[in-house]
Image: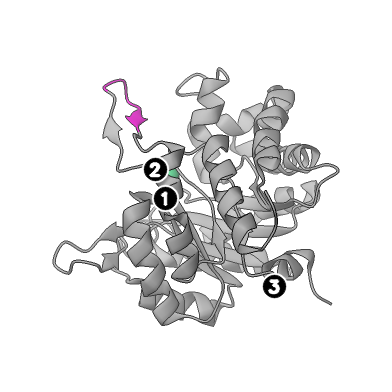
Amino acid sequence: MTNSFQAKLACGCLVGDGGMGTLLQGAGLPVGICGELWNVEQAGKVVALQRQYVEAGSDLLLTNTFGGSPHKLNSYALSDRTEELNAAGARVARLATEGTQTLVLGDIGASGAILEPFGDMEFDVLKVQFSRQVRGLLDGGVHAFIIETMMDFGEVQCIFEAIRSLCDLPVIVSMFFDTDKQNPGQFRTMYGDTPASICEKAESLGADVVGSNCGLPIDAYVDLATRFKEATARPIMLQPNAGLGRPAGNGTVIYDDPPERMATRVDELYNNGATIVGGCCGTGPDYIRQVRRIADRRLGREN
Ligand SMILES: [Zn+2]
């Protein structure tokens, strides 16, 4: 039977959501406070923020659980609440999408631990930790998973195995790339992977969608789309930042590209091979409205 997510993918042109961190801070989340805690303590605020993406036209909404792994939550002494905070994150996102066709992606980011042999974290220990996050997201009712902003494919594999130990829901693998300074137009992760090597590894794992998010503005993503398209027949998901980003001095980063600037190149992302286009750091509902407008035009829907 085709999963609801796979059925949606079949239309060939989907809209993701935008950044969450800046929205949370804009709604009053103090810097240094765990954003996942708001899934329980300020659930109404998180629903209202995520509802903005649903109303802007997101086909897919990410749960507010990017930092919801036990290792990450441990820095706030919250790791014993892993299942609770992730289940709440999934329920909050389901509430934000209520009455719509928007599907909820269980969002999993890097743990912050470094796997052997580069660090001292054992693969099997980390996998057990991630399975607690997966369990919570499943309990809360996600439709699929996204493993995102990843630099180490070893950790992607660890998360993927944790997901597969508990369910067979679709999985998106999305990596963080930087430009390859030696080779213009080429890209590498911090661990040295190219889009081609990532596609090969993600396909052999069984990822349903491959892609990239964060790190670079849309101009770079136009080339990145082509690198992905050359390397895989899987659907591709791309979520650029709203510009390169520059330090604001108080520990935050300012992203300068306005929604209209990003909108000028969204068509090229789809033309070069993207099936799903969303936004990462610095993007908000206004950016997603622009992507929706372009996607609707491509789909032959009147605006
Ligand atoms: Zn980002």
Secondary structure beneath dot 1 equals helix
Q: Residue 159, percent across and down?
A: 56, 61
Residue beneath the point at 35% across and 49% down: 217
Magenta residues? 249-254
State the quadrant of the N terminus: bottom right
Judged left or right of residue 289, residue 169 is: right
Q: Which residue is mark 1?
A: 264
Main secondary structure found in the magenta portion: loop
Q: Is residue 8 visible?
A: yes
Name which of mark 2 and mark 3 comes first in the sequence: 3
- The residue where tag 3 is placed is 10
Q: CA distance from mark 2 to mark 3?
A: 29 Å
Tag 3: amino acid? Ala
The quarter of the rendering in which ligand 1 is drawn is: top left
**What x and y, as percent, mark residue 133?**
65, 50
Closer-to-camera residue (58/69): 58
